[in-house]
Amino acid sequence: MFKKYIIILLSIPIILLTLSHSVFASELNFSVSAVIPDNQVDKNQTYFDLHMEPNQEQTLEVTMRNDTKEAVIVEVDVNTAMTNNNGVIDYSQTDFERDSTLEVDMVDLVDYEKEITVKANSSVTYPIKVKMPAEEVSGILLGGIHFNEKQEEKPQEEKAQIENKFAYVIGLKMEMNEPKVEPALELNEVKATQINYRNAVTANIQNTEPTIVSPLEIEAKIFKEKGKKVLFTEANDDMRMAPNSNFDYAINWDNKEFKPGKYRLELTAKNEDNEWEWEKFFTIENDEAKKLNKEAVELEKNYTMWYIIGGIILLLILLGFVYWLGTRKNRTKNESD
């Protein structure tokens, strides 16, 4: 079943989107808004931005409104923020591998009902209970409260159709202490792979600290192991990373075939206050290159070697023909004598 998910972000502080609530009202049968509590750090924001103490318990409230003539069942998930492979902070993912540096997972701190019914032409106050760890936590905990309308199961013949699925997300940011935590990025595995069946090399970048990296600029260059000529390059200047998260930064191979061999990656990442530079060597094995090239779509084949071989064969044929003409001429001359 092919689905196109269009996520309406009501309040995601990190990606700095400003969306009007009313713009999308016609696409949804309900609306949501955060009830801002007293311990809100920035009371001008419409997401939860909370300062809390160790072991503090608090009930957050979200107002849900249904202005239609039928009841609406709303499904709710509270998700830990992660960084997707587009370099965007994502609050909609429930099942993903947590980063190895994440010490406190937000989903372990909340208690809430997974479904709530909002009657026709009415509003309800939806509670979410939060309890902070007993020990003080440095930096920030970041996540999102994800709301979508529960849909009826469709017949099998309708499941192949493209459908738009809308949702609301209210950001949830919690912190205990005031001191700012500086980001620390690391470059992990570099490997040949495919994205949408197109050859690419990915470099895993990891934010090991409980802080947001935004905006993040990344530039990657790939060379032969000891070469000076840039083979492939990729640059982005408006990326963001969630606290204690990682993502695979892709360097497009421009629809070219992978060639086995040893390569060198030079990668630079920077935000307003920090800059990181790495140099990492990686190898594309022969079997790996063959497999990926076979699976790739829209691949531009490199026929240079075949042209060279063809040229050599043609030259040999030409030389053979010249030799044959020479020997034939000599034989004719000898016969005439």
Image: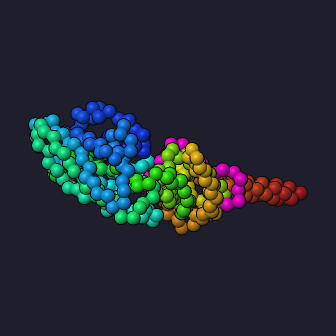
Give residue 71's position: percent from left, percent from top: 11, 43
Say if residue 31 shows up in the picture: yes
- Viewer-proximal residue among 127 and 149: 127
Residue 21 placement, left or right of 135: left
Quarter location, residue 187 = bottom right
The stretch of residues the image draws in magenta is 225-242
- Residue 82: tell me if it is visible: no
* Quadrant where the image shows the C terminus: bottom right
For the point 13% across and 39% down, the residue is 122
- Front position in the image: 130 or 323: 130
Camera-nearest residue between 51 and 225: 51
Q: Position of residue 224 (x, y in %)?
A: 66, 58
Q: In this view, does 260 lie to the left or right of 137?
A: right
x 28%, y 54%: residue? 58
Residue 114 lies, in percent from the top left, at 21, 55
Q: Position of residue 235 (x, y in %)?
A: 56, 45
Q: Does the magenta stretch include residue 233?
A: yes
Q: Is residue 141 magenta?
A: no
Which residue corresponds to the image point at 40% horizontal and 55% vertical from the top-left?
A: 176
Q: In this view, does 18 lie to the left or right of 165?
A: right
Please, which colouring scheme is shown? rainbow
- Total numbered labels: 0
Q: Which residue is drawn at 32% across and 58% down?
A: 56
> On screen, 131 above or below 70?
below
Left/right placement of residue 99 relative to residue 124 reads right
Residue 58 against residue 102 in the figure, above or below:
above
Q: Image quadrant of residue 168?
A: top left
Q: Looking at the image, which is closer to me, 274 or 335?
A: 274
Query: Which image quadrant is residue 280 in?
Result: bottom right
